[in-house]
Image (spheres, rainbow, N blue to C red):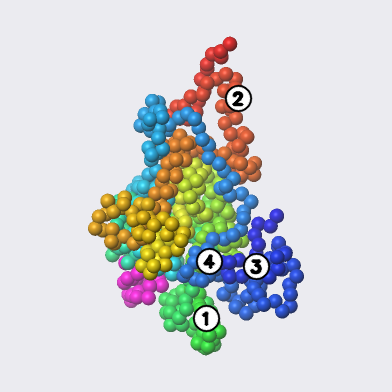
Amino acid sequence: MNLRQPNASTATGTFNRSRNVVPMSGICVECLDGCKGGCEAWLASFRGREVLYPGPFGEITAGASKNYPVDYSHLNIQGYAVGAKGLPDEVTSGPDTAIFPAADTETEYGWTEKVRMRVPIFTGALGSTDIARKNWEHFAIGAAIAGITLVCGENVCGIDPQLELDGNGKVKNSPEMDRRIETYRRFHEGYGEILVQMNVEDTRFGVAEYVLNKHKLETIELKWGQGAKCIGGEIKVRELERALELKKRGYIVTPDPTIPEVQKAFKEGEIKEFERHSRLGFVDKEGFLKEVERLRKLGFKRITLKTGAYSAAELAMALRYGAEAQLDLLTIDGAPGGTGMSPWPMMNEWGIPSFYLHSLAYQFCEKLAKQKIRVPDLALAGGFSGEDGVFKAIAMGSPYVKAVCMGRALMIPGMVGKNIESWLGNGGLPKTVAKYGHSVEEIFVSYEELKAKYNSDMKNIPLGAMGIYTFCQKIRVGLQQLMAGSRNFKLSTISRRDLMSLTEEAARISDIPYVMDAYRGEVEQILAGRDLYCSSVGLKTRDVVASS
């Protein structure tokens, strides 16, 4: 069975002419001389490197299409008919108290200085891509009013058109970074936080010093990588002057805009865009621990780390080094990930898929715990979009996982709300929305709730932000229902026992019991005449007298 059809995808605007395709290569079974298009091999014949990236840049986000052998759909959530873990009085809890709205979805992360969130999700890194820049107001305000953390990604200062550097090449003024931080803070209510990522270029530019000194940020995030790619971040640039400026700032820009022949090709329309790339990072234990210590001495209260779908060795490094550095949060992002711009073949064919990577993370955490080594709080990322995935991730990584990082799933409601605002303004409301009404009040189910809270400030909340808030409310209520059904009324009581593997392969990878084996010990005791009851530590059995 082939897990992916290569050589054609809507992400790259390519397709096969024939209905019959060679599974391994993705090439049409009968490749016709005279074909007018358009598979990737055909398009790459005259557009070359452009075909590496999903597009159109700045208008789409992309998620890889490879169908991995095992993913989170191979897990199901256990449900029980007894118990109420996490309620104030578990022993006397009954149908009138163990109701799903009583389930508490709040979480927190941090080694000592904790950050609380109303829902155990937060945004992926929204960095230097146009899709993040153009929608920032919606994303930032939405995250703030929802009470979740917002991650401002890498290279934001470095690509700022109005960036000012001092004589040492350090950030002196970055209006774009200022806008991003101030927008979130305008509606921040004490839940969640905005944290800024740093890569190689950001460190060289002194981004940490800038956001600390000017904005008094409490948290900074180091970035080793992400699930979508194993190279540095990239964006597309469509102006020669802009490409030259970014090259001057120290970025890798391809094709090289300083070459006269490249400039001529661009002016004549042969080359239509440039790519700006970040450098590869290099990690070693001593350097990592020194950097964490440097950032703490600068004044940051919390240091976090984002790592990607690298080999198991890098995952072990992140966990062990993170434990020694007492990191406040470690986000582990599995393949294939989502992106605003990453090489399409790399997204599909590189890295450890999320289910496998997260299973390894739990195994490594257990090994460290047996050595009496405390690991950082974890967040898992890589393809999550709903409350079922949130529950499964927290359960599979219990007790180490505190939240799920969502990339594209949390961007969608921001863009949907923004578009509804535009459609309402120009009278072009599509039928898919108009069936719910023709006013903001009718369309957004959370409108009156927000209006009662923010009153006159409602005019400053864009509809994209309202979309993110509404989406988070759906996640919260859906998660409460799953928690109540599994008799967990606090996130901290969710455990691996609340999951079952639907396939033996998933059980082998994750160590989550196969559905036919789960609770087998309890089953045998019950069938032998021992009654089942619930305690604060889980399901137990007690002797009963069998009736004659």
Which label belongs to residue 342? 4
Magenta-drawn stretch contains 489: no
Identify the amino acid type marked 1. Answer: Lys
The tag earlier along the polypeptide, 4 or 3, is 3
Q: Secondary structure at mark 2?
A: helix
Q: Which residue is mark 1?
A: 272
Give the residue type that dot 4 points to: Ser
From mark 4 to mark 2, how far is it between C-alphas? 52 Å
Gap between marks 3 and 2 measured at Cα: 53 Å
Q: In this picture, which residue range is highlighted in magenta?
A: 154-178
At 45% from the left edge and 53% from the top edge, which residue is drawn? 405
Name the disc covering residue 7, or none: 3
**Residue that extends furthest to the left in the rendered view of this protein:** 456
Instruction: Tell me whether the residue at label 2 lies in contact with that at label 1, contact meaning CB atoms closer than 8 angstroms.
Output: no
Is residue 299 in sight in this rendering?
A: no
Q: Residue at label 2?
A: 524
From the viewer's perspective, is residue 248 above or below residue 108?
A: below
